[in-house]
Image: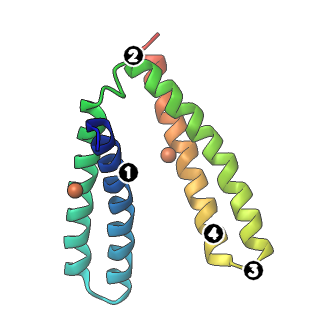
Amino acid sequence: MELQDHVKGNINGETWEVTHYLAMAYKADHLGMGEVADALRRIAMDEANHGARFIFLDGQVEDLKGEIEKMLAGERKAYDGKHDGMKEALGHDKKELASWFDTAAHDEDRHAKILDGILNKYFK
Ligand SMILES: [Fe+2]
Ligand SMILES: [Fe+2]
């Protein structure tokens, strides 16, 4: 295996672990196991840092302004995409899933506003 394959594989693996550990933490909370949830969230943050450092060391965020602009475009697209998901979920009578799509869509909109504000203040 080439070095780049190791780096790429670790980025993908750590990324998957972050969401999976956080999902396990949600489950633990639902089971009334708050301390277990906290421990799983701590692990998730370690995994996020592992993946983030690999991305940083791989030079993927050299152009900070360009990266922020790219993420801003993604956040705006995610807002629309999540609302499409919400409509699909409603069509399948999955109300909680639809509600989560809507909540997350508004988070993406907030992320876009934050990034837009950063671009205007620091990268003009
Ligand atoms: Fe890790
Ligand atoms: Fe976002």
What residue do we see at 38% from left, 75% from top? 26
Badge 1 marks a residue whose secondary structure is helix
The reply to whether callout 3 and callout 2 are in contact (CB within 8 Å) is no
- Is the residue 113 above or below the residue 110 in the image? above
Give the mark nearest the N terminus, 2 or 4: 4
Three-letter code, disc 3: Asp
Across and down, in percent, residue 121 comes to 43, 18
Query: Label 1: which residue?
Result: 12
Lateral position of residue 1 relative to residue 35, left or right: right
CA neighbours of label 1 inside 10 A, class few (<14), some (14 to 19), many (20+): few
What residue do we see at 58% from left, 43% from top? 109
Ligand 1: which quarter?
Answer: bottom left
Query: Label 4: which residue?
Result: 99
The reply to whether callout 2 and callout 1 are in contact (CB within 8 Å) is no
Across and down, in percent, residue 7 comes to 29, 41
Estimate the spatial distance between the alpha carbons at disc 4 and disc 1, rounded to whole Å. 28 Å
- Considering every residue shown, the one lying at the far top of the view is 124
Looking at the picture, tell me which residue is in the foreground, 27 or 118.
Answer: 27
Query: Label 3: which residue?
Result: 93
